[in-house]
Image (spheres, rainbow, N blue to C red):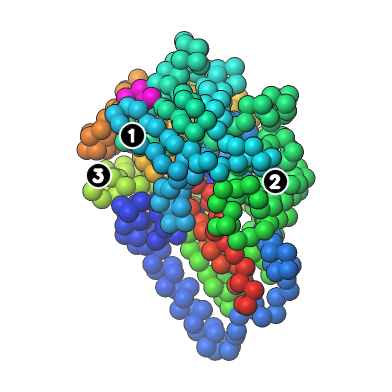
Amino acid sequence: MKQEDPKDFAQAPGDRLTRAAGKQLAIYALAAVAVLVAVMFVLNALAGLTSSAAGMSRMAVDVENNIITTYLRDEPPQMNSMLASDAVSGMVLAHVMEGLLRYGPDDELVGGVAERWQQEGNTVTFWLRDDARWSNGEPVTAHDFEFAWKNVLDPAVGSQYAFILYPILNAEQANNGEVPVSEVGVDAVDDRTLVVTLQTPIAYFERMVAYHTYLPVNEEFHRQTNGRYGADADEMLYNGPFMMTSWVHGASMQLEKNPYYWDAERIRLDGINYAHMTSDASTLLNLFKDDQIVIADLGAEMLEEAMLQGWTLNQFMEGTVFYTDFNHRPERLTSNLNLRKAMALVHDAGELVNRVIKLPGYLPGKSLFPVWLPGAEETFREEYPAQEYRRDITKAKEYLQAALDELGLDRLPPLVLLTGDTPVSRIQAEYYQEVFKRNLDIDLVIDAQIFRQRLEKMTAGDFDLVASGWGPDYNDPLTFGDLFASWNLNNRGRYSNPALDAQVRIAQSSLDMEERMRAFGEIQRIIHDDVIMLPDYERGYVYVTHPQVRGIRRHVIGAETDFTNAWIDAGE
C-alpha cells in the first residue's frame, strides 16, 4: 500500500498465508514470547500482582455512549481515496468507506457493496446490493465506481496509485494519455451492475478490488466540493460502517456509526474517537496507563512495566518491509552502481535491528519480499531464499574507489538521507550516518520530515537516500514485486530496468503459479544484484489492549488496526 505503516501470526490472509505465517513467523517469535510469558509468571507469582484493569477509569471506554478512544500514528495525508497512497489514510478509509469487496474478520474476502461477483475469462461482473447507501441516504451505484476508477486513471489527476488499476483493459494506456479514459474497460451497465473487462485473464483481480483505490466516489458530490474532496470531514460522502463527523487537522478525528450502512447491524460501536495523533511510544504508553486510549504498542523498555501492571501482551507481525531506497535518477550520485555496492557492503540489518532499534517483534530485513508471503507450495522465501549483503569493509572500499573513478571525484560530497521524525527513524538515520562515515568516510546529511512532507519530498525525488516502507495492498507477491517497475509512481527513486519490468509483466499476466513464482524470484535477484535498495527490517509489535474492548483485529491486508468488529464488554 502504502507507504509504511500488523498481523497476528494466526490471522494472515488466506489459508495458505495463515499456514505460512504460523509456520514461519512463529519461529522468530517463539523464543521472545516464551521469555515474556515466563517473566510475567515469575513476577506475578512473586509479587502477587493482579491486573490493573479494576482500577481504571472509563476515559478510554465510554460505556454509556458506546464509544472508544484511540489514536492515529500521524495526520492522514490524503483522505481522497483516488489519491491516497499511505497506510494511515488507508486505515481511516477502511472504517468510513467500503468497496465492492472487503476483508472479513478472519481475512477472508467477502462481499462489500457487491453482493455477488463472477469472473469468466477476462470479464468480471459485480452485482451491487440494493440497500447500499451513501451517508446522505442516496444509493451507491455502479456509476460511482466507474467514475472513481476512471478518475484515478485520468493523467491530469496524477494519482500515484493508478498502476493498481492497470489489469483493466486500456487502463495503463489511458493513464499514459495514449487513449481517452472513456475506453477503459469499466462499464456501469445499470445502477446495480458493473462489468469490468481485463487486459488479460488474471487470478488475483478480486483481491485487488478490496484496496482503497477501488473505492466508489459520488460524482455529483465530488463536483460540488470544487477540488476539495476529502480535505475535511464535510467534504466527503461515506458508505462504510462509520462516518467522519469531526477532523481537527493534526490533532484529532471523530467517527460515528453510519446509520445508512447496509450492514449496520454488524457494527457494535457507536463511535470511535481518534483523540491523539502520535507515534511516540512513551506518549502512547502513558495514555494507555492513564486510561485514555484502548490500545498501545510497546517498546522494549516498556515490557517490564507492562508485566508489572499485569497487562496481557499480544504480538503481531504487520507484514510491512522497511528499507533504505536510493535515488536512481541520472543526476544523482546514488545512480552509480559501484557506490550502491559499497554502501551495501557496510550495511548490516541484523546490527540495526538487534543493537540499535532493539524493539520486540522486529526481524532483520533480507528482501523486499517479507517472510509471510505465500509461494506455490511453501512461503515464497522458503522456495526462493533471499541473498544477503555480508559486511566486507575491504571490498566496500574497493567499490567506493571504483565509483569515485567513474564519477571523476576525489571524494564524495555529502549525501542527503530523507527520513521521518519518529524516534525509530531518528536513531536509524543516526546509525547510518555513523556507519557510512566510519567505514567509507561518506557524510550523510539527515533531512528529518513529518510524514506528509516526507511523502512530498519522496515524490519530488528530493533525496539521495530515503527511509522507506511498503505494506501489502492485496494478498499476492505482486503487491511487492511491482514496486520497482519503471511505471510505478511509488518507485520514488525512479529505478528503471527493462529486465525487471519484463519479469513484472510475466507475474502480472501468467496464470501458471510456478512461472509467476520464478518471475518473483528473478525480481528478488535483480533487486539484490543491482542494489536497488537496502533491506532494513520487517516490523512487528508487542501491544496491549483495554480489557473492556473485544474484537479488535490487526491485519496484514487492509486496516492495520480494525475496530469495525469491536465491541465494549460492559460487564468487564
Q: Residue 196 appears at what percent x and percent y?
A: 41, 27
Q: Residue 414 appears at what percent x and percent y?
A: 59, 30
User: Which mark is drawn over residue 119?
Assistant: 1
Please, is residue 174 above or below residue 429 in the view?
A: above
In this image, 443 relative to 477: left or right?
right
Labels 1 and 3: the sequence-earlier one: 1
Q: Residue 68 appears at what percent x and percent y?
A: 67, 62
Dot 1 crowding, Cα within 10 Å, few <14, some 14–19, many 20+ = some
In this image, 562 relative to 361: left or right?
right
The amino acid on which the numbered mark 1 sits, given as a three-letter code, is: Gln
Start-end of magenta stretch: 197-201
User: Which mark is drawn over residue 244?
Assistant: 2
Nearer to us of marks 3 and 2 is: 2
Say which element carries label 2: strand
> Image point 55% across, 33% down: which residue?
141
Among the 4 quarters of the image, the one containing residue 455:
top right
Nearer to us of marks 1 and 3 is: 1
Magenta span: helix, strand or loop, mainly?
loop
> Image point 60% across, 24% down: which residue?
460
Task: Residue 210: say if magenta.
Answer: no
> Image point 60% across, 48% down: which residue?
261
Labels 2 and 1: the sequence-earlier one: 1
Task: Evaluate if marks 2 and 1 touch, with contact meaning CB atoms under 8 Å apart.
Answer: no
Labels 3 and 2: the sequence-earlier one: 2
The amino acid on which the numbered mark 3 sits, given as a three-letter code, is: Ala
Please, is residue 482 above or below residue 34 in the view?
A: above
The amino acid on which the numbered mark 2 sits, given as a three-letter code, is: Met
Tell me how far mark 1 sits from mark 3, CA to CA.
22 Å
Dot 2 crowding, Cα within 10 Å, few <14, some 14–19, many 20+ = many
Tell me how far mark 2 sits from mark 1, CA to CA.
34 Å
